[in-house]
């Protein structure tokens, strides 16, 4: 018996439970320890199917105590730990499962998902590549490798993987949505929009696709359309902090700073480690001309993600408004080093503030 459940977020997480083959006839019966392990494995699987994660893990522990050589027990315990958010424990179990069974495709797939969550993109790509080698017709493995490659910054390779996932399964809404996101990051807005529309045609309840299309509409200047799509994304997934953060940004662009502040505050309540939300809230404080609060939020954003070029630029402008020219210039330099650009207004303001700083006060 083989139950396959796939939990889809950004990655496809395989929750395919392992089962032992039917026990042989009594004349060829296995040891009593192996039979006990099989019994605890079966009961653990039943608990896991009911969402009773702690009970499932306890039974898998007992199965391992009776027979520590069964790969599927480690794999299933890894699934339970993964669901609980115990990434370190899940990683250990997937490691052991692949040691005992080097051809356990789902163990590589799930270990790659854990490594991706931990930010270990190169290691995740290796695991997804191994899963593809073992089963090249699994669109989930191609999708996952595309996600890891995209997060590593290789958008061309990511899109190629999403292409293959779609080729294998043209109704794979996750791959369509992810390719939309990758094309958006490439700046190919029309192609990205077509992918998002396709994802939503396949599944009108795909919250991530509504979010992505909202971002695309914002980039194309359709702020009302962006709000409509982000409202839908939030209605479908109200625990997604990023959706509130993105809607807050749109409200800010529309000039409604109070609604923007409400959304980014809600995003930070859901996920205090969401760097972009700190950056957007800094922009709200800037719009309210509270430069001290703006700088504090920009600081927090950069502490969480020091790669945010735009936040360095924004903090630089806030520092300029406080007359801190040298600190501002340092932020502008970091912004450029990360590939960001400064608008002509910022350059003019910097020049003006530098001139003020060098002017000597006139004697009466």
Image: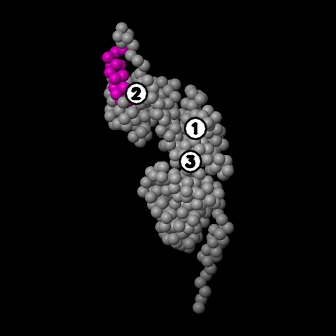
Q: Which residue in the protein does label 2 denote?
A: 73
Residue occupying the point 32% across, 21% down: 36
Q: Which residue in the protein does label 3 denote?
A: 209
Q: Was residue 39 drawn as part of the magenta stretch in this picture? A: yes
Region in magenta: 30-45
Q: Earlier in the sequence, mark 2 or mark 3?
A: 2
CB-based contact (under 8 Å), mark 1 and mark 3: no
Q: Earlier in the sequence, mark 1 or mark 2?
A: 2
Q: CA distance from mark 1 to mark 3?
A: 12 Å
Percent position (x, y) of residue 319? 55, 68
Q: Is residue 278 left or right of residue 40?
A: right
Q: Secondary structure at mark 2?
A: helix
Question: Would residue 302 be visible to someone looking at this image?
Answer: no
Q: Which residue in the protein does label 1 denote?
A: 172
- Badge 2 local density, few (<14 within 10 Å), some, or many (20+)? many
Q: CA distance from mark 1 to mark 2?
A: 30 Å
């Amino acid at each position: 018996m083989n139950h396959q459940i796939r939990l889809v977020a950004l990655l496809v997480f395989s929750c395919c439970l392992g089962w032992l083959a039917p026990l042989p006839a009594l004349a060829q019966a296995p040891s009593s320890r192996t039979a006990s392990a099989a019994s605890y494995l079966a009961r653990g699987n039943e608990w896991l199917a009911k969402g009773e994660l702690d009970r499932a893990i306890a039974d898998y522990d007992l199965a391992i105590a009776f027979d520590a050589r069964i790969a599927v027990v480690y794999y299933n315990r890894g699934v339970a730990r993964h669901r609980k958010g115990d990434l370190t424990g899940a990683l250990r179990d997937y490691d052991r499962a692949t040691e005992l069974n080097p051809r356990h495709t789902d163990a590589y797939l799930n270990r790659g998902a854990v490594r991706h969550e931990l930010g270990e993109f190169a290691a995740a790509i290796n695991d997804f590549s191994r899963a593809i080698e073992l089963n090249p017709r699994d669109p989930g493995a191609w999708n996952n490798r595309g996600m890891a490659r995209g997060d590593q910054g290789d958008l061309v390779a990511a899109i190629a993987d999403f292409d293959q996932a779609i080729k294998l399964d043209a109704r794979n809404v996750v791959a369509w949505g992810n390719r939309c996101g990758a094309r958006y990051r490439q700046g190919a807005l029309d192609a990205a929009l077509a992918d998002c529309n396709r994802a939503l045609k396949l599944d009108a309840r795909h919250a991530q696709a509504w979010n992505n299309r909202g971002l695309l509409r914002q980039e194309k200047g359709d702020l009302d359309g962006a709000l409509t799509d982000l409202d839908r994304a939030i209605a479908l997934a109200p625990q997604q902090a990023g959706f509130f953060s993105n809607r807050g940004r749109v409200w800010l662009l529309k000039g409604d700073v109070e609604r923007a502040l409400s959304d980014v505050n809600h995003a930070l309540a859901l996920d205090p480690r969401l760097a972009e939300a700190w950056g957007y809230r800094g922009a709200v404080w800037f719009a309210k001309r509270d430069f001290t609060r703006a700088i504090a939020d920009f600081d927090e954003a950069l502490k969480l993600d020091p790669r945010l070029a735009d936040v360095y630029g924004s903090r630089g402008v806030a520092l300029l408004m406080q007359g801190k020219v040298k600190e501002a210039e340092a932020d502008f330099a970091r912004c450029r080093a990360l590939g960001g650009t400064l608008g002509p207004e910022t350059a003019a303001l910097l020049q003006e503030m530098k001139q003020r700083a060098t002017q000597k006060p006139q004697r009466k």
